[in-house]
Image: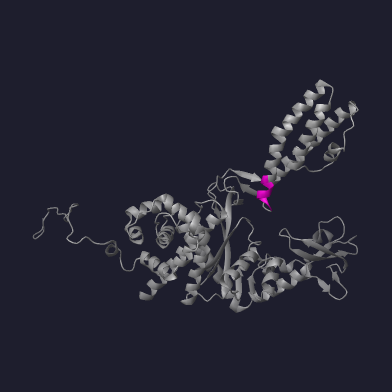
Amino acid sequence: MSKGKSDKITYKPYEQKQQYLIPPGADELIPEDHLVRLVNEVIDEMGIEKLLRKYQTGGGASRYHPVMMTKLFVYGYMTKTCSSRMVAKAARENVMFMWLAGGQKPDFRTLNDFRGKLLKGVMEEIFVMAVKMLSAKGYIKLENYFVDGTKIESASGRYTFVWKKAVEKNDKKLDEKLRAYIRMAEKVWDDENNEYGNRDLEELGGKEKFTSKDVKELAGILREKIESLDAEEDKKKLKRELKTIEKDYLPRKKKYEKAKRICGKRNSYSKTDTEATFMRMKEDRMKNGQLKPGYNVQIGTENGFVVGYDLYPNPNDTRTLKPHLKRQAKRLGRKPQAVITDAGYGSEENYAYLENQGIKAVIKYGTYHKEKSRKWKENLFRAEHWEFNEKEKYYICPDGRKLIFTRTMKRKTNAGYPITIQRYECESCKYCRKKKQCTKAKGNRVIERNERLLRLKKKAKCILEDERYKKLSKQRSVEVETVFGQIKGNQGYKRFLLRGSSKVSTEWGLLVLGYNLKQIFRLSKEKTA
């Protein structure tokens, strides 16, 4: 052992029962620059108490303050403490939550009721207030709107699917069984030479599709007719079948009608969350593209802050842009100057809508990058490279043959948007040496031309090649993907806790409000550094 050093082990004083002369308050235990202080300050500054009071009724026992409950949930969703049980536990044990709650200890049922009932109706308004506050403080300008979507799994069971095609198929089979039964019943009456009143049975038998009302009516008619039969054997047989109609066919028909009504324009839904649709999730654990019930979450950002959000049961991003922008304009009372998205939103309907609204569409179309490739440019058999005479309406193919205008066709996209197509057909591809390279069709080469889409794509291309908008297009992935990366990756939030679109929207509102507060906290730290 060297001189002046001791090999004796010493410990700092450790006394759990040490008494404080003046016990510290929760406020003293929290650092001055802690995130929880910002959450408390910003929510107080927003003044949401009046808004929350509008959705409450008077009477009864005193209740916990809604502003305090809101703070608990916002900070909870920021720190991966999302369930009402976890928040209730944190309010008892975690000094940050204890400070926000002012020492009060709401139980998990109270917290859950607040989130699922009161906050559900007001979360969107709270978020809009926060966005307007960000705009007033200069964090955002509400000029450029970066849009993207992600799919998040529903809290419903993963194997509780109902497929629209399967329902329609089974419904059709049931209709065939009903028609077969009506034919059998008619044969029995024909054999007994019984003429029946107003021929209701014949009218029902001629129907292509039956409703539950028709099945109920059929059962009533058959019950009356069976009683008029003389042959006991026929009576027994028809009574058995009638029992099947009343106990089996009628409930099934009602079940199929309900399923089709819930599906609407969707192709599926979950039994335990009827507003969730089955979609392919990127982060599938099985790595096999398994379909799971979920919601398509659309967000818009600017300068790293979430400015708007909506949830849709439709897995296709293309159909969500127009309704999302309409709702966003209604919420904020203004439109952005430019909308920046990826190629998944590049449809004729979206381009036309943005043009009508006077908004710059910084949106790539499906073939934007392909058009720049050598393979595309050297492919002489693409109609885009052929000579087109706009006045006389004909194309000239690489072999020098004319493709003449034949007719104009009206169509509708899967979203129901009307489009106009002009059809051009080659006068004759017979004996053409280049036909195999040009087309796989047995007959002549046909081209379908959409004038409006070509014009809109040309306009979009000019915008995308402008240096100002090139920067915005590159910025899009940093703007929007960062939000999804933080929430889904860092916070591990990949599955909602609640069921139903309104409750799920409340959860997402809490998440993105918390994300915006973290952004303010980060920027304030950078300023003071």
The location of residue 429, given as percent across then percent down, is 88, 61
Say above or below: 320 vs 237: below
Whether residue 141 can be seen here:
yes
Q: Quadrant of residue 335?
A: bottom right
Figure quadrant of the N terminus: bottom left
Nearer the observer, 278 or 134: 134
- Measuring 82% from the left and 40% from the top, which residue is drawn there? 204
Nearer the observer, 445 or 79: 79
- Measuring 72% from the left and 33% from the top, which residue is drawn there? 246
Q: Quadrant of residue 394?
A: bottom right
- Measuring 64% from the left and 75% from the top, which residue is drawn there? 359
The location of residue 264, given as percent across then percent down, is 68, 52
Whether residue 85 can be seen here:
no
Residue 11 in the figure: left or right of residue 202: left
The location of residue 98, given as percent across then percent down, is 33, 58
Residue 479 in the figure: left or right of residue 422: left
The dominant secondary structure in magenta is: helix
| Residue numbers of the magenta segment | 258-264
Say whether residue 99 is magenta. no
Residue 12 in the figure: left or right of residue 279: left
Residue 397 in the figure: left or right of residue 520: right
Residue extending furthest toward the top: 232
Figure quadrant of the C terminus: bottom left
The location of residue 41, given as percent across then percent down, is 38, 69
Say above or below: 155 vs 419: above
